[in-house]
């Protein structure tokens, strides 16, 4: 082959290579652009889903917070009512308007006999508590009742949060 025939052939091959390279670049650019567009759509969809999920959780959180606040108010009202009742009872015991007694085994202490017949037609011996002892027992019972109310409020709050957020326990 001579140089005069080789040069046009090389020039044609070079032009073909450049054209192929260019076409391949265009094709890759189109594929890259398509991938970028798909990624942008997925990112946008994910951001929208995240925003919607966040809004749902915030709504649930607000509702749970309001329900917990309402339960706390209810507990406060229950405690206030119970304290009022205990105070009234304690005053009645101290004033003698209410007398407390306990059953005793007959013959073990001097007691007042209950004259009302029970189901078995027995007469039950009873001992009356002095007002200070009655008030002390009432205070102990009141503290226990308060603790029970608080624990029930905790259980209610736990169940509310569990049900609100659909938490499954084992």
Image (cartoon, rainbow, N blue to C red):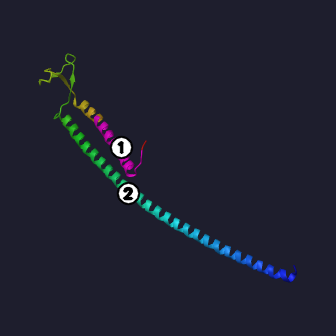
Q: Height in image: 126 above or below 24?
A: above
Farthest residue in the front direction?
Answer: 1
Q: CA distance from mark 2 to mark 1?
A: 19 Å
Q: Earlier in the sequence, mark 2 or mark 1?
A: 2
**Residue at image mark 1:** 155
Q: Secondary structure at mark 1?
A: helix
Q: 11 or 57: nearer the eye?
A: 11
User: What is the residue that sits farthest to the top in this orientation?
Assistant: 107
Q: Is residue 64 above or below residue 140?
A: below
Q: Is disc 1 surrounded by few (<14), some (14 to 19) or many (20+) residues within 10 Å?
A: few
Front position in the image: 129 or 70: 70
> Does residue 151 show up magenta in the picture?
yes
Dividing the image into 4 quarters, which one contains the N terminus?
Answer: bottom right
Quick check: marks 2 and 1 in contact, CB under 8 Å?
Answer: no
Residue in view at x 32 percent, y 49 percent: 71
Give how far across and how far down residue 9 sits, in percent. 80, 80
Which residue extends farthest bottom? 4
Which secondary structure, mark 2?
helix
Residue 149 vs 28, above or below: the answer is: above
Which of these two is toward me, 92 or 43? 43
Q: Residue at x 43, y 62 (%)?
A: 52
Tell me where the magenta segment starts and ends, as one range: 141-168
- The answer to if 25 sits in the magenta stretch is no
Residue under pointer 2: 62
Q: Residue at x 41, y 59 (%)?
A: 56
Asked whether, in this view, residue 136 is left or right of residue 54, the answer is: left
Question: Residue 118 appears at what percent x and percent y?
Answer: 14, 24
Corner quadrant of residue 146: top left
The percent coordinates of residue 139 (x first, y second) are: 28, 36
Residue 109 quadrant: top left
Q: Which mark is residue 50?
A: none
Quick check: 97 left or right of 135? left
């Amino acid at each position: 082959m001579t140089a005069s025939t080789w040069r046009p052939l090389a020039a044609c091959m070079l032009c073909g290579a450049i054209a192929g390279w260019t076409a391949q670049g265009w094709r890759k650019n189109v594929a890259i652009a398509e991938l970028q567009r798909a990624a942008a759509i997925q990112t946008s969809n994910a951001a929208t889903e995240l925003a919607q999920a966040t809004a749902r959780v915030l709504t649930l959180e607000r509702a749970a917070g309001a329900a917990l606040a309402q339960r706390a108010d209810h507990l406060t009202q229950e405690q206030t009512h119970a304290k009022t009742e205990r105070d009234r009872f304690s005053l009645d015991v101290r004033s003698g308007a209410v007398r407390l007694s306990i059953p005793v085994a007959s013959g073990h202490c001097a007691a007042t006999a209950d004259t009302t017949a029970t189901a078995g037609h027995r007469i039950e011996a009873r001992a009356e508590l002095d007002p200070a002892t009655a008030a002390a027992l009432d205070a102990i019972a009141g503290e226990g009742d308060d603790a029970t109310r608080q624990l029930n409020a905790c259980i209610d709050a736990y169940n509310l949060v569990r049900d609100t957020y659909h938490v499954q326990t084992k």
